[in-house]
Amino acid sequence: MLKKALFIPVIILFVACHSSKKASIASVKTEQTAATPENPDADGSSYEKAIVIQETSETKGVSAEYAWLKKQYPGYKMQSQTLSTNNKKPYDILNILTSDGEKKAVYFDISNFFGKF
């Protein structure tokens, strides 16, 4: 009887840890694939080269922008953010200071998620 009493909590703990690990892996995959540029020259330096965010909700879309920045410009500092429109599409322009001290404006096409909650 004591073995059964110990066995059940161990199984519950195993299942809980396994489920948690799957959630962590899923969020990493989302961050890695969140900003896929429509054109191979996309680097975020202009409207024409904006990073297209593929997420379809505001929360995930904004997170994808910051994940992209963190990956491309480790140690960056956020300066400001502007919502803009170009050719009837919404864009976020994030002004950052790179870890090297360079000021950059990074353009994100947010048409896939803007206004969607």
Image (tube, helix red, strand yellow):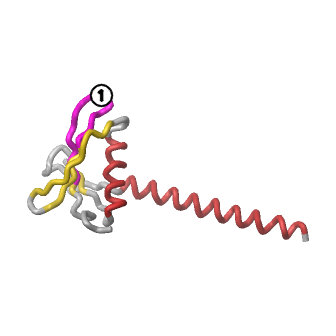
**Residue farthest to the left, as pictured:** 87
Q: Residues within 10 Å of mark 1 (few under 14, many from 20)?
A: few
**Residue farthest to the right, as pictured:** 1
Residue 110 rendering spot, x and y as whole percentages? 23, 59
Q: Residue drawn at (8%, 60%), measured in percent from left and top?
A: 87
> Where are the magenta residues, as a range?
95-108
For residue 95, what is the image quadrant? top left
For residue 21, what is the image quadrant? bottom right
Magenta stretch contains residue 21: no
In this view of the protein, which residue sits in the foreground, 55 or 92?
A: 92
Position of the C terminus, as image quadrant, is bottom left
Residue 63 rendering spot, x and y as whole percentages? 36, 54
Q: Is residue 32 left or right of residue 45?
A: right
Q: Is residue 31 left or right of residue 89?
A: right
Position of the N terminus, as image quadrant, is bottom right
Looking at numbered disc 1 in the image, what kind of residue is underneath it?
A: Asp
Q: Is residue 111 left or right of residue 71?
A: left
**Looking at the image, residue 77 lies above or below residue 116:** above
Q: Residue drawn at (40%, 58%), measured in percent from left and top?
A: 30
User: Dot 1 corresponds to which residue?
Assistant: 100
Determine the secondary structure under disc 1: loop
**Looking at the image, residue 8 lies above or below residue 60:** below
